[in-house]
Image (cartoon, helix red, strand yellow):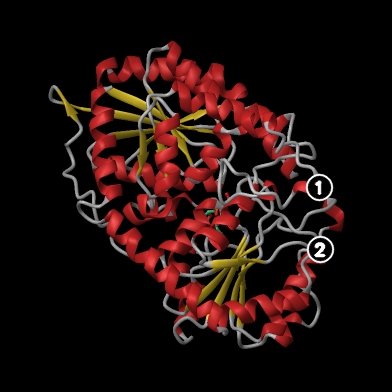
């Protein structure tokens, strides 16, 4: 892991008339949202802010792992989702379910800390009711969006996408370019549910409202990666935009993992030559069918490439009693000596390991950024949400990976792995990923764009 380069700020910077300033945080309780929020917490704490984390009972953080922060539990009351359609409904429900209890706890915290020492609340943009509750108590807010700038632009453009007929998606138009949002095609747009309407529209409308009513937008991206998209956001939004990514290079989030990472895989990786191992992980939410698990397994086995594969508990979809989590019979013997399967990996360290030469990912935004910043080219199998759009950027804009889409078949998996790990194409993608890795390091170094954005964010927060 590269040591945090830039914001070498002295603790105690965030002081107001002799008293330390507080920043309040509220993450959405999903791994891909918790990690960037805790990375941000580390960054702000290093700047001298006292950090208070409000959190739901669902996926509650372990305070013992972060003795430097204060934690305030907020009852959320809603059941844990099981299917992805439920996740969207659940995200919408969570904010509402927490609102009243959050308002009470926020009021107590404000009384305890003394009003003028509280700089602001930074909340996940999916928690609109939390923004509204804070506004009612006159606490300034900043919105953290954990996706790309391009995805944020897509959210803002949602009404236009319906007006111009790009949405709802028509099968015959899936490959049509979205002229207003290049390089997206219709198939790359964020669509949740069959018609792209209903819940998706509500999710997007509310997240957009949270951004617009906040006093600033924080994004885990960087100028060299999304300059044009960031310029677009600055043009379209009335609030300042802080592109302070890659956050994990400022402040690792290892301790915010909900599952226990199996660190023995790092030792296992030590035995392999540089860039020889394929790392396979589809993040914390995506589920595959039992059939796709089998095709994935035999595709990996048939490629002959050494691999480290994360097979997460609950990763196989279907009725609970039909979930076949286990790998196909014979897979262990066929890959003996060249593969390791773990339930959760220390991903940042894995991607930074010299033995890892490729990443087969679902193209979640954190995974995409982490891969890019370690110069690792990707195979992308997007499942839902922003993952199709991220895949489009990986393949078409940055040209650091290729899509393995559609029906997963062992033959096409083998061919894609071969192309990424062994073929000249893969070598070129690795070279380009290496260039982006360098650009990311420059952005986070002193005087780099992200480092300057952190300074601006800090000044902004102190002025609220
Ligand atoms: N992650 C991890 N170990 C794993 C798989 C994922 O630590 O075995 C982390 C990964 O580093 C990333 C987050 O979990 O920070 C997943 O976020 P992402 O946006 O990529 O996908 P999501 O889980 O939200 O779909």
From the viewer's perspective, is the residue at label 1 or at label 2 nearer? 1
Q: Is 170 displayed left or right of 182 in the figure?
A: right
* Residue at 61% from the left image edge and 31% from the top image edge: 204
User: Residue 89's quadrant in the figure?
Assistant: top right
Of residue 240 and residue 140, the one placed in the foreground of this image is: 240
- Tell me whether circle 1 and circle 2 mark residues in contact (CB < 8 Å): no
Disc 2 C-beta below 8 A from ligand 1: no
Question: What mark, if any, has residue 458 been given in the picture?
Answer: none
Query: Picture coordinates of residue 49 (x, y %)?
Result: 26, 35
Q: Is 451 displayed left or right of 29 in the figure?
A: left
Of residue 135 and residue 100, the one placed in the foreground of this image is: 135
Q: Which residue in the structure is indicated by mark 1?
A: 171
Query: Picture coordinates of residue 51 (x, y %)?
Result: 33, 35
Question: What mark, if any, has residue 290 been given in the picture?
Answer: 2
Tell me if residue 263 comes above or below residue 251 in the rendering.
below
Q: How far separated are the C-alphas under marks 1 and 2?
A: 27 Å
Mark 1 Cα shell of 10 Å, populated few (<14), some (14-19), many (≥20): few
Image quadrant for the C terminus?
top left
Of residue 32 and residue 314, the one placed in the foreground of this image is: 32
Image quadrant for the N terminus?
bottom left
* Residue at 34% from the left image edge and 52% from the top image edge: 251
Tell me if residue 251 comes above or below residue 196 in the rendering.
below
């Amino acid at each position: 892991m590269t040591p945090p380069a830039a914001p070498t700020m002295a603790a105690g910077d965030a002081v107001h008339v002799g008293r330390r300033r507080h920043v309040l945080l509220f993450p959405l309780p999903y791994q891909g949202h918790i990690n960037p929020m805790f990375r941000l917490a580390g960054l702000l704490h290093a700047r001298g802010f006292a950090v208070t984390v409000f959190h739901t009972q669902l996926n509650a953080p372990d305070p013992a792992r972060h003795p430097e922060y204060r934690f305030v539990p907020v009852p959320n009351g809603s059941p844990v989702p099981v299917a992805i359609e439920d996740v969207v409904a659940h995200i919408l429900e969570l904010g509402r379910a927490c609102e009243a209890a959050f308002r009470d706890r926020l009021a107590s915290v404000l009384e305890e800390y003394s009003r003028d020492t509280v700089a602001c609340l930074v909340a996940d943009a999916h928690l609109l009711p939390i923004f509204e509750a804070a506004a009612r108590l006159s606490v300034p807010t900043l919105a953290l969006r954990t996706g790309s700038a391009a995805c944020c632009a897509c959210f803002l453009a949602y009404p236009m996408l319906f007006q111009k007929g790009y949405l709802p998606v028509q099968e015959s138009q899936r490959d049509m370019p979205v002229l207003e949002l290049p390089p997206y095609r219709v198939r790359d747009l964020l669509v949740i549910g069959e018609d792209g309407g209903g819940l998706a529209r509500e999710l997007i409308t509310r997240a957009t409202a949270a951004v617009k009513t906040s006093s600033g937008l924080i994004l885990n991206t960087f100028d060299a990666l999304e300059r044009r998209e960031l310029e677009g956001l600055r043009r379209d939004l009335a609030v300042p935009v802080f592109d302070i990514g890659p956050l994990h290079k400022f402040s690792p989030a290892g301790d915010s993992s909900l599952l226990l990472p199996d660190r023995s895989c790092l030792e296992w990786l030590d035995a392999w030559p540089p860039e020889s191992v394929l790392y396979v992980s589809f993040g914390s939410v995506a589920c595959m069918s039992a059939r796709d698990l089998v095709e994935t397994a035999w595709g990996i086995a048939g490629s002959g490439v050494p691999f480290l594969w994360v097979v997460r508990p609950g990763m196989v979809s279907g009725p609970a009693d039909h979930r076949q989590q286990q790998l196909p019979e014979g897979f262990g013997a066929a890959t003996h000596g060249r593969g390791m399967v773990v339930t959760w990996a220390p991903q940042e360290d894995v991607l930074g390991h010299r033995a890892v030469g490729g990443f087969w990912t679902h193209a979640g935004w954190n995974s995409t950024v982490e891969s890019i910043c370690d110069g690792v080219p990707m195979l992308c199998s997007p499942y839902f949400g922003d993952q199709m759009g991220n895949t489009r950027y990986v393949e078409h804009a940055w040209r650091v990976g290729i899509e393995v889409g559609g029906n997963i078949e062992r033959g096409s998996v083998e061919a894609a792995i071969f192309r990424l790990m062994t073929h000249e194409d893969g070598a070129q993608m690795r070279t380009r990923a290496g260039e982006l890795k360098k650009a990311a390091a420059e952005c986070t170094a002193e005087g780099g764009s992200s480092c300057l954005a952190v300074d601006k964010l800090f000044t902004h927060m102190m002025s609220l």
